[in-house]
C-alpha cells in the first residue's frame, strides 16, 4: 500500500477547517474515508476528489527549517567615564560597520547616563558575533583609565 493517507486532523489543517467539520463531511458521505481503529483516514485521491484540486503539502511540511541561535543581552557598566564610553562606542561602531561576510546578525544600542556614570549596551545578534562584541567590551573596559 503506497497511497498516502491523512488523518482528519491533517485534512482539517490543510483545508483550514475545524476537525469536527471534516468528521461531519465523512459521516455525511461527502468525503470518502476509511475507519482504522477509532480514527478516520482519508486517501490523497479522495481528498483531491473532494476539493477538486491536487492536495498540496501542509505549510509545516514545506517549511525549510534552519537552526538559528540568537543572543539578547544587556551589558551594564557603572562608574565609567565619558572618555571610556567614547572609546568603547567608537570601537563597537567600527566593529559593527566592518563585519565580514558570514558574520552573524548584530544590532547594538548604546545608552549612557553621564549623571550616574552608567552605561547600558543592548546586544542582539548571533552567538559568535555577540561573543566577539563581549570580547571588545571587556578589552576596552579593562584598560587602565588615563
Image (tube, rainbow, N blue to C red):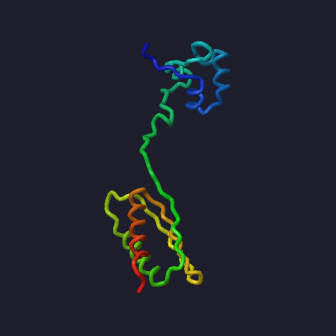
Q: Is residue 145 above or below residue 137?
A: below
Q: Quadrant of the N terminus?
A: top left
Q: Is residue 26 above or below residue 91?
A: above
Image point (41%, 61%), residue name: 131
Residue 87 found in image quarter:
bottom left
Q: Position of residue 61 (x, y in %)?
A: 47, 34
* Residue at the image position 51 percent from the left and 33 percent from the top: 58
Q: Residue 96: give x, y in percent of width and height.
A: 39, 68
Q: Residue furthest bottom?
A: 146
Q: In screen coordinates, is 25 left or right of 118? A: right
- The picture places residue 21, in percent across and down from the top left corner, at 67, 26
Q: Residue at x 48, y 26 (%)?
A: 54
Q: Residue 130: x percent and y percent?
A: 42, 61
* Residue 12 horizontal side relative to residue 99, left or right: right
Toward which corner of the image does residue 7 lie, by quadrant?
top right
Q: Nearer the viewer, residue 49 or 143?
A: 143
For the C terminus, give its image quadrant: bottom left
Number of callouts:
0
Q: For residue 64, which quarter of the picture?
A: top left
Left or right: where 146 falls relative to 114: left
Task: Pick whichever, 61 or 133, lies toward us.
Answer: 133
Amino acid at each position: 500500500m503506497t497511497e498516502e493517507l491523512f488523518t482528519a486532523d491533517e485534512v482539517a489543517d490543510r483545508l483550514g477547517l475545524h476537525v469536527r467539520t471534516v468528521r461531519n463531511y465523512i459521516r455525511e458521505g461527502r468525503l470518502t474515508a476509511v475507519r482504522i481503529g477509532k480514527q478516520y483516514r482519508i486517501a490523497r485521491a479522495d481528498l483531491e476528489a473532494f476539493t477538486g484540486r491536487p492536495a498540496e503539502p501542509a505549510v509545516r511540511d514545506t517549511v525549510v527549517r534552519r537552526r538559528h541561535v540568537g543572543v539578547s543581552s544587556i551589558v551594564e557598566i557603572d562608574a565609567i567615564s565619558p572618555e571610556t564610553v567614547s572609546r568603547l562606542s567608537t570601537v563597537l561602531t567600527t566593529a559593527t560597520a566592518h563585519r565580514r561576510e558570514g558574520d552573524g546578525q548584530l544590532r547594538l544600542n548604546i545608552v549612557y547616563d553621564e549623571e550616574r556614570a552608567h552605561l547600558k549596551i543592548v546586544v542582539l545578534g548571533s552567538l559568535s558575533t555577540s561573543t566577539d562584541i563581549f570580547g571588545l567590551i571587556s578589552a576596552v573596559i579593562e584598560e587602565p583609565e588615563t
